[in-house]
Image (cartoon, grey):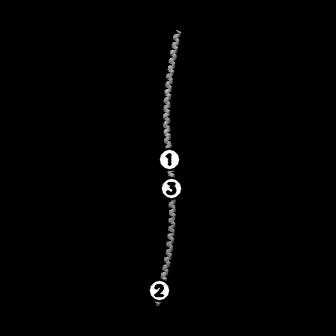
Amino acid sequence: SRGHSAEERRSCDRDQLQEALAALTKETKEKENTLAALEYQTLGKEQALASLEDERKAREEAIVAVEELRRSRDEMLGMLEEERRHKEAALVALEQERHSRGKTLSFLKQETEVVSRLSEEKDKRQ
């Protein structure tokens, strides 16, 4: 009877070990599935992060390009302003020259009138 009982105990122990092994195998499989899901989420998040990093780099490049355009525009505006000042100065010089010519012309008209009168008076005397 004791031998039979030991055999039963070994069978019972074996059944318990098989149940424990099955439970551990199931738990291990569940944890492997959880780990795979976490790895998949991590991969997705890494891809999203890489995409955000690419977007950030593109924005930085766009900012640099805009700053270069602004500098170029400012240089162009500076050149246009300089050209405008030169043209204004030339216009002032032309206006002064016109005024001066007007004075010269007025003087020449007066001189012509004087010469004309003198000529008439000379003709009358002769």
- Residue 28, label in figure: none
Q: Residues within 10 Å of mark 2 (few under 14, many from 20)?
A: few
Look at 51% across and 16% down and name the residue there. 12
Q: Residue 36 at what x, y percent from top left?
A: 49, 31
The amino acid beneath tag 2 is Ser
Look at 48% across and 82% down and name the residue there. 113
Look at 49% across and 43% down and name the residue there. 54
3D distance between C-alphas at marks 1 and 2: 87 Å
Q: Are marks 1 and 3 in contact (CB under 8 Å)?
A: no
Nearest-to-viewer mark from 3 and 2: 3
Looking at the rendered structure, the secondary structure element under dot 2 is: helix
Q: Residue 52 at what x, y percent from top left?
A: 50, 42
The amino acid beneath tag 1 is Arg
* First-in-chain label (1 vs 2): 1
Question: Label 1: which residue?
Answer: 59
Q: Is residue 31 above or below residue 95?
A: above
Q: Is residue 22 above or below residue 122?
A: above
Q: Residue 58 at what x, y percent from top left?
A: 49, 46
Q: Are marks 1 and 2 in contact (CB under 8 Å)?
A: no
Question: Label 2: which residue?
Answer: 119
The amino acid beneath tag 3 is Ser
Q: Residues within 10 Å of mark 1 (few under 14, many from 20)?
A: few
* First-in-chain label (3 vs 2): 3
Q: Is residue 107 above or below residue 93?
A: below
Question: Label 3: which residue?
Answer: 72
Look at 51% across and 65% down and name the residue there. 86
Nearest-to-viewer mark from 1 and 2: 1
3D distance between C-alphas at marks 3 and 2: 69 Å
* First-in-chain label (1 vs 3): 1
Q: Is residue 43 above or below residue 63?
A: above
